[in-house]
Amino acid sequence: DYQVKLVATNSAGTHQITKQVTVTAAQEAPIADFSFSPTTPETGQEVNFTNESQHATSYQWSAEGTSFSSTDENPTFTFDTAGDYQVKLVATNSAGTHQITKQVTVTATSTGGGNSNPCNLPECYVQSTSTVSSGLTTTITYGYTLVNGKKMISSITTSTGFGDVVTSIEYDAQGRRSKDETKLGGSLQNYIEYEYSNGDQTVRANSYDAGGNLTGYTISEYDANMRLNRTDNYTSAGALTSYTIFSNFLNIDGSFPQLVETYNANNAITQTDVHTYQDCQLKSTVSKDGNATVIGEINNTIDANKLLRTSVATIYTQGFSITSTTEYVYDCD
């Protein structure tokens, strides 16, 4: 506030007047910025956008390929389809506008592949399996835990003549698999730790022995719909030993590759698996070696409730075959 004074003078004398002049600061141009949470959202999960703009008085949000449009300062939005989305914020005031665009990578709801229930399967979980091969019976039981409201496998126990082999599975705060730990009779045998990058589309699994020494690792690549496309296998020194390509997917709603090809480090194909499906369950698999000779088959029985009930696996080797039959028991039986 400035007091401006005028003094007027003539031969008869002087007179003065004072008036206040209030000067305001010039409007600074806006600077648009924002953050969002979670940073790697899943389909169907609400994303919270936090406005971090400066000097702005109004906002316009949008994202190409979606219905997202908002003038709220801190809006929320739910993406229905997995993919990379360019979210734009335009910040405005009387001095002008400024905009910023950030990529939001949305992954499919099911960890590690596609829609978690594309065929509307019943809410049943495998409780145990019993496999008979060459007169011997192997029983495997499964434990579960709730992770962010979802039922996830927490343990796999295989009974053997040397004691129970128990694999315990851990998850991080985002519901991603973080560690597998295998024990025999309570003694640690080995463990695997998982690392995620590229919006969870790249997963590295590091394998360690009981002493904590790296024994090898795999790198798995997923597409925007979280379908597994490729897995590379490496030694602890980083030498590629083999890789597997998954292709000819049944649909985009889940990880249902109809063709799986395995190659050695010299890019020579060593095995080809052809899958067929029924009600989102694996119906059969025919495996051939690099010379196109059938080396194995799997034939599964799917019941009226769309549940896998029996699996008959046959391996062909050196002129004879070995067959095993597995039966499944569910917690909804």
Image (cartoon, rainbow, N blue to C red):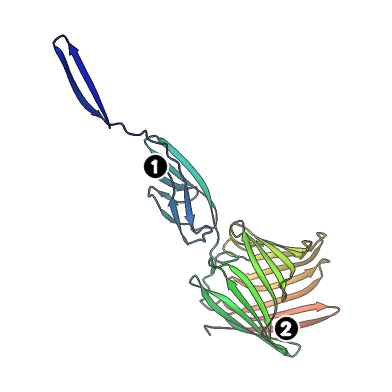
Q: Residue 101 shows which numbered tag?
A: none
In the rendered structure, are the residues bearing label 1 and label 2 in contact, judged by CB atoms less than 8 Å apart?
no
Residue drawn where x is 75% and y is 79% of the image: 314
Say if 308 sits above or below 38 in the image.
below
Residue drawn where x is 53% and y is 67% of the image: 173
Say if 278 sits above or below 231 in the image.
below
Residue drawn where x is 71% and y is 68% of the image: 274
Residue 71 percent across, percent down from the top left: 38, 47
Quarter of the picture holding the N terminus = top left
Q: Residue 324 shows which numbered tag?
A: 2
Give me the C-alpha separation between circle 1 and circle 2.
Answer: 69 Å
Residue type at mark 2 is: Ser
In the image shown, does 7 or 221 lie closer to the viewer? 7
Say if 215 sits above or below 12 in the image.
below
Residue type at mark 1 is: Ala
Residue 58 lies in what quarter of the image?
Answer: top left
Residue 306 percent across, percent down from the top left: 56, 76
Residue 19 percent across, percent down from the top left: 21, 27
Q: Secondary structure at mark 1?
A: loop
In the image shown, does 254 or 240 lie closer to the viewer? 240
**Pointer 1 or 2: first along the chain:** 1
Label 2: how many Cα within 10 Å (few below 14, some 14–19, many 20+): some
In the image shown, does 253 or 181 lie closer to the viewer? 181
Horizontal relation, residue 5 to residue 194: left or right: left
Q: Secondary structure at mark 2?
A: strand
Is label 1 or label 2 in front?
1
Q: Which residue is mark 1?
A: 56
Say if 80 sits above or below 314 in the image.
above
